[in-house]
Image (cartoon, rainbow, N blue to C red):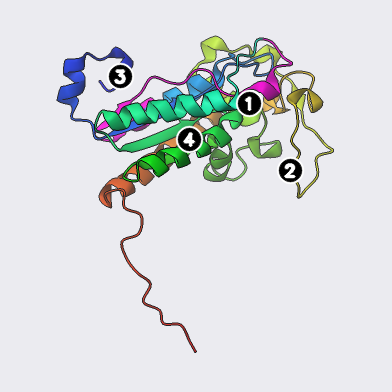
């Protein structure tokens, strides 16, 4: 057992944990067909699978609300403001450090949390230089790079509650999904090279982007397995090197 929520203090002590994994999610509309807590559930389920394969890793309770102000046109959005979100992530990491563990992995499930995670991590590093922090900020992007070519049919699986996210939801928690409510909304006027800072209602009227109608649990299992394998491999490599990132110097001499 490695889920802090379900453990006694005695079990935590005897577990001899030297690292933690924190799932960071949200509660907001995911189309009309996925549970509002999709981001939390996916990141927590991935975290538990990773910890099951990594010795000494304690699974912290997930953060179930994130920054979701850009989704609040749709029901039923819960959101922290940015400052609150930064403080929540910072405070949890600081609590971990006070408990004598300085290796922290952040498993993010929601786009609105990316900036707060970055700021909170930087602030922790300023105050606690010995803290070691790693994260998977965008599993939905990395999954598209890890699964076999041709797995996704539309937009390389991207989108909020699109092909990829819907697929992993159908795999992990089909009981909280309504596939018959899935839609396809692919914004076709987004610029190629620059980034638009949108409110979600500007690019969809269904609280969903991408093509959820072609999502399948089989695609979701592929994503799940590839993501877990990749994170486990990276954490094993970090452990092997003591979470020290630069152990050698380049010996190549500069040419005059």
* Residue beneath disc 2: 195
* Residue beneath disc 1: 215
Residue 155 drawn at (x, y percent): 70, 38
Mark 1 or mark 3, earlier in chain: 3
Rate crowding at label 4 as few (under 14), some (14 to 19) or many (20 or more) other CA atoms within 10 Å. many
Residue 254 drawn at (x, y percent): 46, 82
| Residue 51 counted in the magenta span | yes
Mark 1 or mark 2, earlier in chain: 2
Rate crowding at label 3 as few (under 14), some (14 to 19) or many (20 or more) other CA atoms within 10 Å. some
Q: Which mark is residue 39?
A: none
Q: What is the C-alpha distance between the residues marked 4 and 2?
A: 23 Å
In this rendered view, identify the residue nearer to me: 101 or 138: 101
Residue 91 drawn at (x, y percent): 41, 26
Select label 4 or label 1 by which is in front: 4
Drawn side of residue 248 relative to residue 149, left or right: left
* Residue beneath disc 4: 120
Q: What is the C-alpha distance between the residues marked 1 and 3?
A: 33 Å
Drawn side of residue 59 relative to residue 140, left or right: left
Q: Which mark is residue 4?
A: 3
Secondary structure beneath dot 4 equals helix
Whether pointer 4 and pointer 1 mark residues with C-beta atoms closer than 8 Å, the reply is no
Whether pointer 2 and pointer 3 mark residues with C-beta atoms closer than 8 Å, the reply is no
Q: What is the C-alpha distance between the residues marked 4 and 3?
A: 22 Å
Residue 234 drawn at (x, y percent): 38, 46
Which contiguous range is marked in magenta?
48-75
Mark 4 or mark 2, earlier in chain: 4
Select label 4 or label 3 by which is in front: 4
Q: What is the C-alpha distance between the residues marked 1 and 2?
A: 26 Å
Let me know if residue 168 appears in the view: no
Q: Residue at x 76, y 50 (%)?
A: 193
In this rendered view, identify the residue nearer to me: 27 or 33: 27
Secondary structure beneath dot 1 equals loop
């Amino acid at each position: 057992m490695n889920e802090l929520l379900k453990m006694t203090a005695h079990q935590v002590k005897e577990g001899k944990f030297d690292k933690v994994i924190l799932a960071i999610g949200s509660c907001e509309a995911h189309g009309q067909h996925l549970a509002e807590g999709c981001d939390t559930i996916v990141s927590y389920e991935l975290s538990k699978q990773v910890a099951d394969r990594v010795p000494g890793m304690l699974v912290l309770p997930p953060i179930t609300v994130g920054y979701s102000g850009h989704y609040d046109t749709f029901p039923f959005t819960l959101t922290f403001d940015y400052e609150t979100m930064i403080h929540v992530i910072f405070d949890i990491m600081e609590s971990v450090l006070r408990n004598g563990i300085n290796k922290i992995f952040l498993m993010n499930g929601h786009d609105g949390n990316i900036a707060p995670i970055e700021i909170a991590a930087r602030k922790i590093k300023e105050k606690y230089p010995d803290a070691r922090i790693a994260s998977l900020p965008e599993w939905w992007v990395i999954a598209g790079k890890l699964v076999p070519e041709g797995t996704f049919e539309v937009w390389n699986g991207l989108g909020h509650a699109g092909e990829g996210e819907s697929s992993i939801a159908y795999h992990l928690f089909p009981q909280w999904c309504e596939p018959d409510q899935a839609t396809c909304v692919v914004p076709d006027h987004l610029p190629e090279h620059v980034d638009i800072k949108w409110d979600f209602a500007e690019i969809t009227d269904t609280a969903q982007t991408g093509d959820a109608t072609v999502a399948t649990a089989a695609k979701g299992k592929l994503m799940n397995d590839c993501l877990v394998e990749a994170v486990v491999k990276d954490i094993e490599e970090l452990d092997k090197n003591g979470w020290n990132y630069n152990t050698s110097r380049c010996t190549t001499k500069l040419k005059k």
